[in-house]
Image: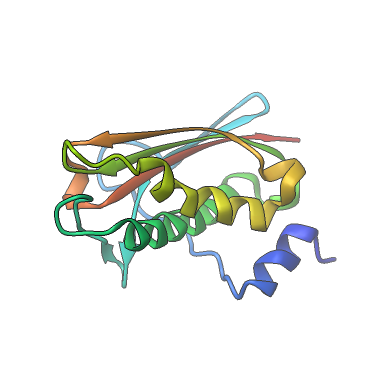
Amino acid sequence: MSTPIAERLQALGITLPPVAVPAAAYVPFVRTGSLVFLSGHIAKRDGKPWVGQLGTDMDTETAKAAARAVAIDLLGTLQAAVGDLSKVKRIVKLLSLVNSAPTYTEHHLVTNGASELIGQVCGAEIGAHARSAFGVAQLPMGACVEIELIAEIE
């Protein structure tokens, strides 16, 4: 049986990717009680880190697209963690790190790429989440964006 989340993914033409193999000494997710914590996912394009620094060599709209791509990867990991996205009761929080120059101030707009996609896929009731967006001097492998997610499950 199709669920609203599965239907929205299909309508958006999104196929969720498999869980990526961690690049260091960590696991992709941890379940504890009714919460699932997803490790940070970096932006990737064509299977490689989506490299760039906001305010230096990348613009906000491009990084917003990168954040959207991260959200798709996060949903793939979340599906692997819970088995079926219909078990997600709430996306609790996103934490977004944006590789940026000291003068860059549009981190929140970059992160909207992920927040908007999560809202589209999960719907307003499940997808509305708390969020933090930070600028950082650098991210692993030079990625432009890294995002982690916390979800409540049944």
Q: Residue at x 56, y 70 (%)?
A: 15
Residue 130, x across and y down, in percent: 57, 31
| 44 or 54: nearer the viewer | 54
Q: Which residue is drawn at 49% across and 64% down?
A: 17
Say left or right for 86 vs 21.
right
Asked which quadrant contains residue 66, the reply is bottom left
Q: Residue at x 64, y 45 (%)?
A: 82
| 79 or 89: nearer the viewer | 89
Q: In which quarter of the image is the N terminus?
A: bottom right
Q: State whether residue 92 appears in this view.
A: yes
Residue farthest toward the right in the current orientation of the protein: 1
Q: Which residue is drawn at 48% across and 49% down?
A: 112
Above or below residue 31? Residue 72 is below
Count of numbered labels shown in the rendering = 0
* Colour pattern: rainbow
Residue 94, x across and y down, in percent: 50, 37
Q: In which quarter of the image is the C terminus?
A: top right
Say left or right for 18 vs 91.
left
Residue 95, x across and y down, in percent: 44, 35
Above or below residue 122? Residue 154 is above
Q: State whether residue 80 appears in this view.
A: no
Say left or right for 125 vs 79.
right
Residue 13, x across and y down, in percent: 60, 75
